[in-house]
């Protein structure tokens, strides 16, 4: 959280975190495409030659007011590939909340679990209390065949106490529900600290 008192702006950072190809970038692309231009900034995306996100995607959204401050949400994604661990940790610095995007496809559980574990470790190293830090879980790719049940995903990831949303980022199902949930969780956390 960063407050620009001169402009009356409250800058909040949300990071979409998850395994490679889980749908983090697709979430931001869908949000960007369906948010009025006057409420969003440009979508900045850095990609590799294989059309994978190298560092991050960035999207800025503006919403309502919090304690007479105008919140500006900056949405980022991390690279999912394991060899970008240092980049993922760097992008998590200064975050106010996380959307963990889990790939619902059978056969992706090991990657989901590894990504969840490293996310938690990074957040702890950055000084966050995992039990109270705003984390929303999205079970993405629910539109594909051969997906694991939401109950099994909850159990395997150990996220029974976290808000979870089923989604298809490609089709948009659950994308804005997830975004609304993380924005509300972040705003609630900020109100407690202001």
Image (tube, rainbow, N blue to C red):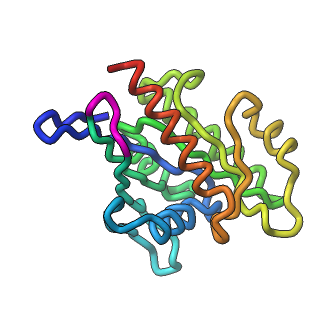
Whole-percent x, y for residue 6 in the image:
10, 37
Left or right: 137 as drawn, with respect to 61: right
- Residue 55 quadrant: bottom left
- 23 left or right of 154? left
Q: Which residues are magenta?
A: 64-68
From the top left corner, tell me how far across and down residue 26 is, in percent: 56, 67
The quadrant of the rendering that contains the C terminus is top left
Q: Which of the image's four quarters has the N terminus?
A: top left
User: Is residue 58 shown above or below 164?
Assistant: below
Confirm whether the magenta stretch covers residue 66: yes
Q: Residue at 64% of width from left, 70% of height from top?
A: 170
| Residue at the image point whose x is 42% and y is 35% from the top | 96
Q: Out of 35 and 79, give the one closest to the viewer.
A: 35
Q: What residue is at 45 percent from the left and 26 percent from the top?
A: 189
Q: Residue at x 47, y 47 (%)?
A: 15
Residue projecting furthest to the left:
6
Looking at the picture, how far across and down is residue 191, in whole percent? Answer: 39, 24
| The residue positioned farthest toward the bottom in the image shown | 49
Residue 3 position by quadrant: top left
Query: Which of these two is toward me, 5 or 23?
Result: 5
Residue in front for this viewpoint, 185 or 77:
185
Q: Which quadrant of the figure has residue 151?
A: top right
* Left or right, 65 with reference to 25: left
Question: Does the magenta portion include 77?
Answer: no
Nearer to me, 48 or 61: 61
Q: Main secondary structure of the magenta part?
A: loop
Residue 34: x and y in percent read 49, 68
């Amino acid at each position: 959280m960063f407050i620009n008192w001169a402009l009356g702006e409250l800058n909040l950072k949300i990071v979409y975190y998850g395994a490679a190809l889980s749908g983090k970038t697709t979430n931001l692309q869908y949000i960007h495409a369906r948010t009025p231009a006057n409420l969003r900034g440009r979508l900045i995306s850095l990609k590799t030659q294989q059309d994978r996100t190298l560092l991050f995607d960035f999207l800025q959204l503006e919403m309502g007011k919090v304690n007479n401050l105008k919140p500006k949400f900056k949405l980022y994604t991390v690279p999912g590939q394991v060899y970008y661990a240092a980049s993922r940790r760097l992008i998590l610095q200064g975050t106010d909340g996380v959307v963990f995007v889990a790939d619902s496809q059978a056969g992706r559980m090991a990657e989901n679990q590894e990504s969840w574990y490293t996310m938690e470790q990074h957040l702890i190293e950055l000084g966050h209390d995992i039990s109270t830090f705003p984390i929303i879980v999205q079970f993405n790719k629910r539109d594909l065949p051969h997906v694991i049940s939401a109950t099994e995903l909850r159990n395997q990831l150990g996220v029974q106490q976290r808000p979870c949303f089923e989604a298809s980022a490609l089709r948009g199902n659950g994308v804005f529900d997830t975004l609304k949930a993380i924005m509300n969780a972040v705003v609630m956390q900020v109100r407690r600290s202001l």
